[in-house]
Image (cartoon, coloured by chain):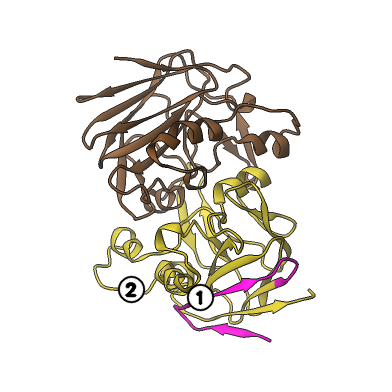
Chain colours: A brown, B yellow
Amino acid sequence: MTEMIEKQSGVAFYLKKGAFLKVIDPQGEQVSDLVAFSANDKREKLSSGKTLDFESTLFITKGHHLWSNRSQKMMEIIEDTNGRNDFLLAPCSPETFHILYDNPHYHPSCFENLEKNLKPFGIDADDIPTAFNIFMNVQLAPDGTISVEPPMSKPGDYVLFRATMDLIIGLTACSAEQSNNYSFKPIAYEILSKP
Amino acid sequence: MTEMIEKQSGVAFYLKKGAFLKVIDPQGEQVSDLVAFSANDKREKLSSGKTLDFESTLFITKGHHLWSNRSQKMMEIIEDTNGRNDFLLAPCSPETFHILYDNPHYHPSCFENLEKNLKPFGIDADDIPTAFNIFMNVQLAPDGTISVEPPMSKPGDYVLFRATMDLIIGLTACSAEQSNNYSFKPIAYEILSKP
């Protein structure tokens, strides 16, 4: 069954080892931030630094694994129809809009949406790691300058993950104008026992 | 006073707000992994994802800040005579040598050295974040492939940091062959009240 994450919101759920998670961009040009924790010990969680190290590439896609802070495989990427994701940048937060985008007003954010939805699972704001930013199109200049460009995802593009341990997942429909070309769209997802 | 971190080892210490930390490569071609925690609340700690986001560059050097998971400035880089550091890759760990370098035997690692030295400060292994890898020369191919090359640091090169909050610092002389061109050298450091 396809579940919808409404624009600028998030969800959290359990994902059993061996189950599949399909994250779909239903309308195109939208980003989804994913974080993962071991359901058996929440101190084990997604690690950008471990993943970039063990996979030896900036661009995590089909065939790669997402790794934990304890050097264990958490998820495998089985399919990735768009092929562009980011694992460098922290989830957008209230401070992102103040500091980076010079917006002094309240703004919804992936960080708040992850915090709110992970709290019932006993996970605190301080424990939220750098997210795997599905469909996020981060471009790098030769001098290392990072820029956030509109996603290249088309309607129906998806990333299919297989859980390699029992997990708690946090997942958002991104709240930042810069990440989704000022579109604020939903994200769809499916939990499947077979791909 | 100059303190020495012997090869393949580490230290941890308090650094007061406003104090300066000078990390020196005394012989050249050596890497030092740095992690930082707020001394007032250890749940606030260094964040690669926040730093890359707020500084909008892969190459953190003079004029940049290191940021916390709470979107606060922890340290400012006042001087950087070499100019090449890494903030992508997790500290080398026992698993790094098993998984990435196919070495089944015990190998010293920055992660173990950080763990051992931070434990007296009440910081657990699971809480150690991706380190700021001083002098580490990570090169990126256009397709995103990450390679670890010998450091470009010369004897006496240093990075000078100013603490912008009260900190607990963990610091190593790197244990990985690939990070320091198979040299296993010490790292020197100084804590200064003036630069």
SS for dot 2: loop
Give the mark, 1 or 2, whose residue is nearer the N terminus.
2
Q: To which chain does the residue with label 2 belong?
A: B
Residue B77: x %, y % from top left = 71, 62
- A49, above or below B85, in the image: above
- Magenta residues, start to end: B1-20
Disc 1 and disc 2 on one polypeptide chain = yes
Q: Nearer the viewer, residue A154 or A100?
A: A100
Q: Quadrant of the N terminus of chain B?
A: bottom right
Quarter of the image holding residue A148?
top right
Q: Quadrant of the C terminus of chain B?
A: bottom right
**Crowd tier of the residue under label 2, counting other residues whose Cα lies within 10 Å: few below 14, some 14–19, many 20 or above:** some
| Residue type at numbered disc 1 | Ala
Residue assigned mark 2:
B107
Residue B168: x %, y % from top left = 58, 67
- Residue in the picture at 75% in, 67% down: B18
- B126, above or below A139, in the image: below
- B132, above or below A68, in the image: below
* Residue A163 seen: yes
Left or right of A9? Residue B22 is: right
Q: Nearer the viewer, residue A188 or B179?
A: A188
Residue assigned mark 1:
B173
* Residue B31 seen: no
| Residue type at numbered disc 2 | His
Count of numbered marks:
2
Left or right of A97? Residue B169 is: left
Give how far apart the Cα atoms at labels 1 and 2 are. 14 Å
